[in-house]
Image (cartoon, rainbow, N blue to C red):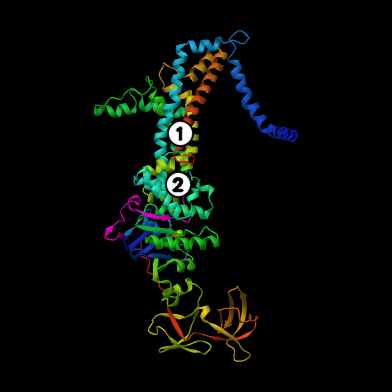
Amino acid sequence: MSGSKVKTATLLLCLLPGVGYLLALFGLPLVRVLSGSFTERGSEGPTLATWAELFGNPVYMDGLWFSLWLGIAPTIVSLCISLPLSALMQANETSRKLFGTLYKIPLVVPGIVAGFLVLVILDRGGMAGRLLAPLGVTMPRLVRDDWGAGAIIALSWKTVPFMTLIIAGSMAAISKDVLSAARTLGANHLTVLRRIQLPLAQPGVTAAVLLSFIGSLGSYVIPSLLGPSYPLPLSVHMFSEGFQQGNWPMVYAMGTLLSAMAIAVLLAYYAIIGSLSRNDTARG
Amino acid sequence: MKPSLSIRQLTKQFDSNLVLKGIDLEVAAGRFVVLLGPSGCGKSTLLRTIAGISDPSSGGIWLKDRRIDAMPPEQRNFGLVFQTYALFPHMSVEKNVAFGLEMRRVNKRDIAHRVAAALELVGLADYAKRLPKQLSGGQQQRVALARAIVIEPDVLLFDEPLSNLDAKLRDTLRDDLRALQQKLGVTSIYVTHDQSEAMALGDEIVVMKNGEIVERGTPIDLYRRPAYRFTAEFLGMTNVIEAKLRDRACQLPWGDVRELENPSERDVEGVAIRPEDLAIEAVETDHHGVVEQAMFMGAATHYWIRAAGKTLRAITSGGRTAILPVGQKVRLVPPPMLHLLRAHHPLQEVAA
Ligand SMILES: Nc1ncnc2c1ncn2[C@@H]1O[C@H](COP(=O)(O)OP(=O)(O)OP(=O)(O)O)[C@@H](O)[C@H]1O
Ligand SMILES: [Mg+2]
């Protein structure tokens, strides 16, 4: 018994450098944010006032849902582009070369530039509008619209290459023989994608979804440039609360809420993935 | 009766590299044909083209009288077994075997039935719930075999299925595979570069070199009476000896004269003497050569004999004779009939 206690202690000691580092760099700031959210501007003692204000203000609550929307929508849009693109890149040498170059272009364009590109092209009176006008087609409102379409387009433009990079990478790691075996057994391209490529590339897809969702959820530049004036995502609120109002407890509360939301969405995502993949595994 | 397979004038080009140079091959229904050739000669490419995974550059493939070369692989109903096993790593053994049946929309109860029967056939009934990574290489290849036969394929294709296994397992699985193929009577094409595997398995062997078929025949014919030197040398060991041809006989460099089996052969590169057909006798005088090296292999002893300016191989079997020491003078006793070998000239590369 005491031997195992010594072992546990040794183990903890060995873990200390790594875990301590994580705690110091990651845990402490998190604790600071969390505890900061239980304070109030101008007073010291712990209070729920800031949280009450956050949940009581419909402007903030609309902001929260809009943040979620801006996290989820571009992730779904880019997944719909990246998945088929990654699968196509596995099909043959020609498509690998073609798409392999194309998808990297957005990678070298900074977010703010991408935002302005979308603005110049898709805004009313922008390039697309002027090109389509002679054909009698009027552009729908895509910039500063209620649904944030412009922001979603710009965010997707940024995430597609990252997603493709990760997903194509994990798909390329699947043995070509395994894919050929599925074909000869009677699976067409789509079935191979669904039954073989997706489940085997799932860790890559998950990583890509995670990166894209977190990135878009916290994005500031693109929604302020292309998003509607109402609602504003929490990221934009956080900036103005902090730097324009000096209301740091509110910034902390919003940050905590945003992180909690991210964790909730990711847990839901894992639950869905888990139930999808259970069909084919041994525990069946 | 299972259908026959015909391949006509099949070519395959990768960029400017002509990998298959007009293959003509008929595989009769129910036959087990082995494609044998050195690495890089295009065996896998041919097999993958038959399976539909790779498209031919020209030529056609017929299953009985149905042309199939434009058909995608999922419609061909061919079973393919790979050197790498190629099992679906995220599916259990039974899910792997069931996959082809699910694609054919067989109902659930029949699937369970047929999967169980196929696993029984390959001796893996107790492993149905395992994942591939929980099996040994030999077991994995058995699963792959079960997965290929459970769909009752018109043709079974094998691409060096035993190459990743150790020697002992290779022999057992080889024998099982042959027995299974005979039981099912499926038309089969088997790719290998291992000549002993080819001879043990094939009803017929097709020898390939540089994207062409050199010759084909039963294992015995190809071993005993190959037309080409390439075949003779690829199918086991052989001594190729330059002999003086005279009419229906030939004179070997050390003086012996022997009758020829095929005296009318043209473009001759030499006569073939298999090491096991070349007997040696220890002598004190009038010797033909000396023992350069002797290797005791258990069932047989291998000799390297220096004679007529080159090194010849001889194999003596049985345990009654003592092993001759290095330096021993010997007489060579060739068999009564000798076989002429022809030179093989590759097709002129077609300019791209
Ligand atoms: N996808 C490809 N692109 C270009 N060249 C290829 C491709 N696949 C095969 N080749 C070439 O075709 C030739 C034949 O290859 P193949 O795989 O058919 O040989 P093999 O007879 O199966 O050899 P091994 O016994 O080593 O498996 C080789 O020279 C190879 O380099
Ligand atoms: Mg090969």
Image position of A35 with respect to A131: above or below: above
**Residue A12 covered by magenta stretch:** no
Tell me the kind of residue under disc 1.
Answer: Ser
Q: Where residue B236 sits: x, y (%)? A: 50, 72
Image position of B64 with respect to B135: above or below: below
Label 1: which secondary element: helix
Ligand 2, seen in the image, is in the quarter at bottom left
Q: Nearer the viewer, residue A159 or A51?
A: A51
Residue A250: which disc? none
Stretch in magenta: B60-86
Q: Which residue in the structure is indicated by mark 1? A: A275
Q: Where residue B78 sits: x, y (%)? A: 36, 55
Q: Nearer the viewer, residue A243 or A38?
A: A38
Occupied quadrant, residue A137: top left
Residue beneath the point at 35% across and 63% down? B30
Label 2: which secondary element: helix
Residue beneath the point at 31% across and 56% down? B69
Judge: label 2 CB < 8 Å from ligand 2: no
Q: Where residue B31 sits: x, y (%)? A: 37, 65
Protein chain holding label 1? A
Q: Where residue B178 sits: x, y (%)? A: 44, 63
Q: Is residue B18 visible?
A: no
Image position of B81 with respect to A209: above or below: below
Quadrant of the rendering where the N terminus of chain B is positioned: bottom left
**Residue B85 covered by magenta stretch:** yes
Q: Which residue in the structure is indicated by mark 2? A: B94
